[in-house]
Structure formats: C-alpha cells, structure tokens
Image (cartoon, rainbow, N blue to C red):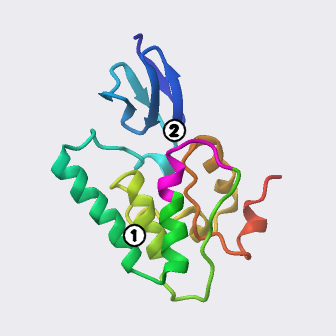
Amino acid sequence: MKDELMAHTGWRRLDGGWAYLHGGGALGGTGAVAGVEASLPAALAPLILPAPPTAPELRSAICASLAVLDLAPDRVTVPTLGAVWRSILGAADFSVFVYGATGRFKTALASLLQQHFGAGFAAHRHRPQAAQRVPTGCGLWPLCAGDCRVDPVAGAEARPRCAPR
C-alpha cells in the first residue's frame, strides 16, 4: 500500500480491505494498517484508537465500558452507551442526545462516552461539541468525524445553533 494522508475518520475501503480511520492512522481486521496517516482538525485530534487488545485487556475494556450503565438510570445510560457501540457498525439514520437541567452530569456522561473513541477526550480539555456552545464548529463534526457522531448532549436549546445552514 502506498502512503496515504487522511483528513477524516470512519470506515474506508483501502487496498488491504476495510479499515477504520482515526487520529493515529487506521485499524483493519488484523490490526494497524501500515502506510496510513491522519491529519485531523484539533477538535478530533484525541480520536486515537489503541491497537487491538489481548483477551484479558479486551475483557477488562468491555467491563469498564459496561460500568457506564451503573452511573445513571437505564433510560439515560442504555441508549447513550448503545449509541457508542452502534456507531462502529456504519451509517445510522438517527442520533441520540441527553437533555436536562443544569448540574445533572450530562457533560460528564458525554465525556465518558467520548473516551470510547480515544483516551485523549478528557472532560476538562475536550468537552462535547454542544456543551461548548460554539456554533461555528458544529457543522465540522459530522463532516470530519465520519461514522463517529460525538454530540450526545445537544439539548433543544443547542439544536438551532448546530442545524445545517
């Protein structure tokens, strides 16, 4: 495979088959794909996936992911965590968002969910897009993030700001 520079994330057919593009390159069915680099916008730079884990590491990672279900009522955690796992399957014709009063830990939950897509997504550095209330950046996420839609806290008051123009 020739060296390629990608500027987005998501599934892509490369010379060696299907691979998922992320900030650290690409992951295929057998692990890291050689010759693929990524140059993502700063907001997506933390989206770096690790190499596929060994069996014990995988078990531990799945248990850590499922622990999110214990953080809030099922009506909140089941759909939001389900959306994280669903996102890796490809395009979807729906989105999920969490809304509610201030101080209900919406941003904290969204930040934990974002960390499924890169440990660099820390609540104090990379808040979910809608929580930042930056209307000029909202349109860039779906374009650059490919199959990974990370905007689970866009409440009703934020949607008009992020609507396509």
Q: Given the image, on which type of amino acid does mark 1 rest?
A: His
Number of marks: 2
Q: Label for residue 124?
A: 1
Query: Residue 64 appears at what percent x and percent y?
Result: 29, 65
What stretch of residues is rendered in magenta?
A: 84-92
The residue carrying mark 2 is 9
Query: Residue 92 appears at what percent x and percent y?
Result: 65, 48
Q: Label for residue 148?
A: none
Question: Is residue 106 something one can see in this rendering?
Answer: no
Is 89 within the magenta? yes
Real-space Cα separation, disc 1 to disc 2, in angstroms: 23 Å
25 sits to left or right of 100: left
Q: Quadrant of residue 36?
A: top left
Q: Which residue is outermost to the top?
A: 2
Q: Quadrant of residue 59?
A: bottom left
At horizontal 34% and vertical 63% (from top left) the residue drawn is 65
Q: In this view, does 26 lie above or below 104?
A: above
Task: State the residue in front, 22 or 59.
Answer: 59
